[in-house]
């Protein structure tokens, strides 16, 4: 990627179930959400803040908020089940969000996780104190096997949600195993969340092409239901990247409430899709953080950074945001492909 002319591809959009099985398996908004990596500290997971976004790629705080108190209720629940979960429907801990970004940057939406679970119990939390607006309410605990796979291109019959492996998932067999892990001791592998009553909802959207031709100008369109201040990062498939906004030309990218902002602005040099190898297609990921409070933007905006530090900055920012109410910020990711001029 060259950030004088940068671009590339889309990211963790939440998968939807095929219409004929949606009632059976649910989608991104269903009750149960799977962890990218299981954790043996199941009880301590309860009560932690969950950073939910409409575009997927949820994260869980690495610890409970100060003053949050939890009483744990345990119930036996023994069963075996298989699941297939789209990458956008997985959740990472804040400290592991970098791994999620690296997967999406390299493989886009084609990554899925296949689970084989022996569930043993469910833990549920009664909470007191300032735990947060959205918190982990219960966790499912069990042993099992998880494999990350890359689905064959063009194999999708429909965007899949959480379904059984095979026909229920609405997808043909996936190919190319990327990573696998097995755990024999029961660990937390999935959770449900609880949202504070009457929580204010901040909605933020990004529009851009899913495919660009090498040398083609890029335009990002942002919109929100209230005024927001933006930080935008572009990542290559390797995970290298950089912050593109704020910039010298646009030090405070601001989208007004209920209106659109198109960048690059007329006053700045345009961005163009640019391949490192003009004969080889590539993928990029745009990660955008939007803040409704100017003081939050000023607090977290990046200092001048060298190219290649975009991923490290995103990881650092994700950890820091655990102290900011989710109603005051949002995150959207988009992947896009850059193809050679001859279309090959």
Image (cartoon, rainbow, N blue to C red):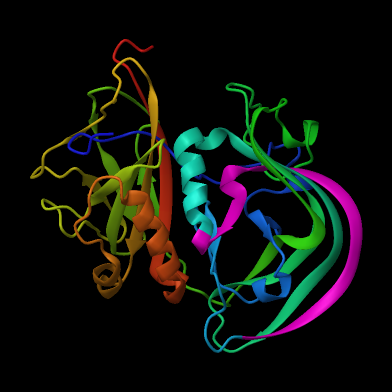
Q: In this view, does 111 lie to the left or right of 21?
A: left
Quadrant of the drawing holding the N terminus: top left
Query: What span is in magenta?
Result: 69-95
**Looking at the rendering, which quadrant does residue 302 occupy?**
bottom left
Q: Can residue 52 be seen in this view?
A: no
- Pick the front one: 189 or 222: 189
Q: Residue 119 in the image: state x and y as whole percent.
A: 85, 58
User: Residue at image x 23%, y 45%?
Assistant: 262
Majority secondary structure of the magenta segment? strand
Q: In this picture, is 275 found above or below 242?
A: above
Q: Does the magenta stretch include residue 89?
A: yes
Q: Residue 30 in the image: state x and y as whole percent.
A: 68, 55
Q: In this picture, is 156 found above or below 76?
A: above
| Total marks in image | 0
Q: Is residue 84 magenta?
A: yes
User: Residue at image x 51%, y 74%?
Assistant: 199
User: Residue at image x 15%, y 53%?
Assistant: 250
């Amino acid at each position: 990627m060259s950030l004088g002319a940068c671009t590339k591809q889309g990211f963790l959009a939440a998968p939807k179930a095929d219409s004929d099985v949606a009632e059976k398996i649910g989608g991104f908004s269903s009750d149960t959400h799977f962890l990218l990596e299981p954790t043996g500290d199941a009880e301590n997971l309860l009560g932690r803040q969950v950073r939910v976004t409409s575009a997927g790629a949820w994260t869980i705080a690495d610890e409970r908020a100060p003053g949050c108190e939890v009483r744990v209720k345990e119930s036996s629940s023994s069963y075996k089940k298989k699941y297939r979960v789209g990458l956008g429907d997985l959740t990472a801990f804040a400290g592991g969000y970098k791994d999620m970004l690296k997967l999406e940057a390299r493989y886009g939406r084609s990554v899925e996780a296949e689970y084989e679970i022996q569930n043993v119990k469910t833990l549920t939390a009664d909470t007191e104190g300032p735990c947060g607006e959205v918190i982990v309410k219960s966790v499912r605990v069990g042993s099992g096997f998880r494999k990350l796979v890359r689905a064959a291109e063009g194999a999708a019959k429909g965007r899949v949600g959480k379904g059984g492996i095979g026909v229920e998932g609405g997808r043909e067999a996936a190919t190319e195993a990327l990573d696998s892990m097995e755990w024999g001791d029961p660990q937390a592998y999935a959770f449900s969340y609880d949202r504070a009553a009457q929580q204010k909802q901040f909605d933020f959207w990004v529009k851009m092409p899913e495919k660009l031709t090498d040398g083609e100008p890029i335009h990002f369109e942002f919109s929100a239901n209230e005024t927001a201040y933006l930080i935008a990062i572009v990542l290559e498939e390797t995970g290298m990247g950089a912050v593109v906004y704020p910039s010298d030309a646009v030090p405070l990218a601001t989208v007004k409430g209920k209106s659109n902002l198109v960048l690059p602005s007329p006053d700045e040099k345009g961005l163009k899709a640019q391949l490192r190898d003009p004969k080889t297609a590539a993928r990029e990921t745009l990660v955008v953080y939007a803040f409704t409070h100017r003081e939050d933007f000023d607090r977290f905006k990046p200092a001048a950074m060298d190219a290649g530090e975009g991923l490290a900055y995103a990881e650092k920012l994700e950890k820091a945001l655990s102290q900011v109410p989710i109603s005051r910020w949002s995150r959207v990711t988009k992947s896009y492909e850059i193809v050679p001029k001859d279309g090959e």
